[in-house]
Amino acid sequence: MTDIDAFGLVLLVIGLVGTAAVLSNRLSERLRVPAPAFFLVFAAAASDIFPNLARLSGGTVQRVVTVALAFILFDGGLHIGWRRFRGAALAIGWLGVAGTLVTAGVTATAAHFGFGFDWRLALLLGTALSPTDPAVVFSVLGRREVGGRSGVMLEGESGANDPVGIALLVALIGATGSPAAAIGHIAVTFVLQMAVGAGIGIAGGWVLLEFMRRVPLPNEGLYALRTLAAVPAIYGLATVAHGSGFLAVFAAGILIGDERAPYKREIVRFHSSLASLAEIVAFIMLGLTVRLHDLPVGHAWSIGLALGALLAFVIRPVFVGLVTLPIRLRRGERLFLLWTGLKGAVPVLLGTFIVGSGIAGADRGYDIIFVVVAFSVVVQGGFVPALAHRLNVPLRTIDPEPWSLGVRFREEPEGLHRFRVARGAPAVGTSIEDLPYGQNAWVIFIIRHGRLVPARSDTRMETGDEVLVLADPAEVPALRKLFAARRADHHHAERGRAGASARMRGAALRSGSGLRRALPGRSAAGPRGGGPDGSAARDAGPVAGPDAGPDAAPDAGPDAAPDAARDAGPGTPTARVDPAPNGDQTGT
């Protein structure tokens, strides 16, 4: 076989493996087993069948997985956004730091007294097993999205505790000398990494945002590549400054997530796909480092299963549960949050750090970490959908909506707002001409069940309609009340859904520089849903929609859906109107 043939065979195998990894998400949804479990276990089995696959050096695996994790965390920050994050920032910070420290300490104590590990290795094991991975949860939920405060907490906790766990492990590995000196070194290193990482992340996110807004590029495809290059730059700068690079990229993503920028929707979609690829690469690479036939050695199987059960049924529910007591959550949401502290790629990555440190018993510890992660994603992850239903955790089904209607502009558009008609809203059953809005508002489009509905004067609003309104900013508060649920209905619905956060989310999508005034008492929509003269909305100003990015607009509220957003800015930005990808976009 020639070199060209061999290279072609390698590409064929990579392509087939990649296709199988993508399709495994369908199998994951059907079997209720997280897709990362397939990547991890199949890669470990492949390394046993084909030993050459396991010859990757530990340093190579660490570097590849570190880069992958950086992109995963940046994408996580983008999808959370500042407006969602700020509503639970203190709770996420508290759970991310205190929950990680408590988990590490209690797990280390169990490893030392229960399984005879010396204190240093026990502390390293406990720290490695403390971070959580919401991607595993979201994988098993499929097209269903966790709503309410618990959804934000799930995403935010992992973004916070991954950097905390990594920084703590690095500090533990570097600690030397007397116990007092070691504790002092760990504390100083940990605080320094957190502070520097957060500072550089915020500064780097702000600089990147201004760069995205103010520096046009000659090609649409370059906008996503610019942020692609910025992520490792922010990570590298924080790391060189002795800060947490992971916290830096997560903070930068949060800062950018809600802001407007040219081609924002395309950038977010690119990073979402990149994060999915990074997750596949990370789990496969980590799986290749494990040899299944070595797991029985040193009782790694039994110890790993025991530690996994302790984490799932005792440590997380009881000890981390005490940490969550100051956090305002419903009982069902609290129990769901505590159960879904699933382990993923980060514990296995930290296991490679332990092996690389040369500490006695590190290889055995790595095998134990692998077993714990496998137990977590398969056993805990498998019960997530049923538990969510049992505990009445609010879930939204996100149906794929691959078609969009788009218009592009050279200048930054403003003025278009998007609302979802909530159940019991004053607008329900009311025709457009009878809607009590001012003269500076104009209904442009109505999206009903994923289809455009002509916005005629006699068109009546229905629950669930998505309404695009061209309006003066002064009209927005009244419009929000018009399309949102009445307060009494809201509280009744919240009780009926066991506190499932009946508030429908608002997403103001700005578009258009020429604001038309609607005639008093009449719909501005013509017979074809365009202008008063029946023309398309070209005269009404530009149209923008959720394809603009995951940035919730100013009137969206802290719980605004991440995909209901505005993409506007110089440099020929994209502005689209398409069915709401997350289906819950009007605030009260």
Image (cartoon, rainbow, N blue to C red):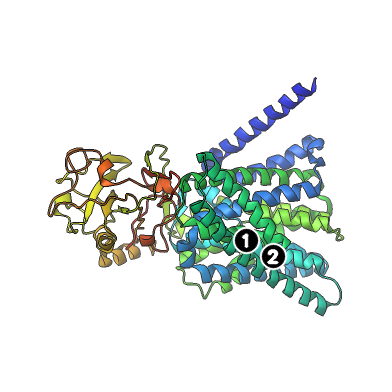
Q: Quadrant of the C terminus?
A: bottom left
Nearer the observer, 417 or 221: 221
* Discs 2, 1 touching: Cβ within 8 Å: yes
Q: Position of residue 337 (x, y in %)?
A: 53, 62
| Side of 64 relative to 401 (left or right) | right
Which of the 4 quarters of the picture holds residue 293?
A: top right
Q: Secondary structure at mark 2?
A: loop
Q: Position of residue 390 (x, y in %)?
A: 46, 57
| Side of 403 relative to 92 (left or right) | left
Q: Residue at 33% of width from left, 45% of height from top?
A: 543
Q: Quadrant of the N terminus?
A: top right
Q: Which mark is residue 28?
A: none
Q: Residue at 23% of width from left, 49% of height from top?
A: 443
Which of the 4 quarters of the picture holds residue 73?
A: bottom right
Separation of disc 2 and disc 1 at Cα? 8 Å
| Side of 453 relative to 310 (left or right) | left
Q: Specify which label sits upstream in the sequence, 2 or 1.
A: 2
Nearer the observer, 484 or 470: 470
Query: Given the image, on which type of amino acid does mark 2 rest?
Result: Gly
Query: Given the image, on which type of amino acid does mark 1 rest?
Result: Ala
Q: Residue at 42% of width from left, 61% of height from top?
A: 559
Nearer the observer, 170 or 518: 518
Read off the residue under disc 2: 243
Q: Residue at 79% of width from left, 23% of height from top?
A: 3
Badge 1: few (under 14), some or many (20 or more) residues near its Cα, within 10 Å?
many
Read off the residue under disc 1: 248
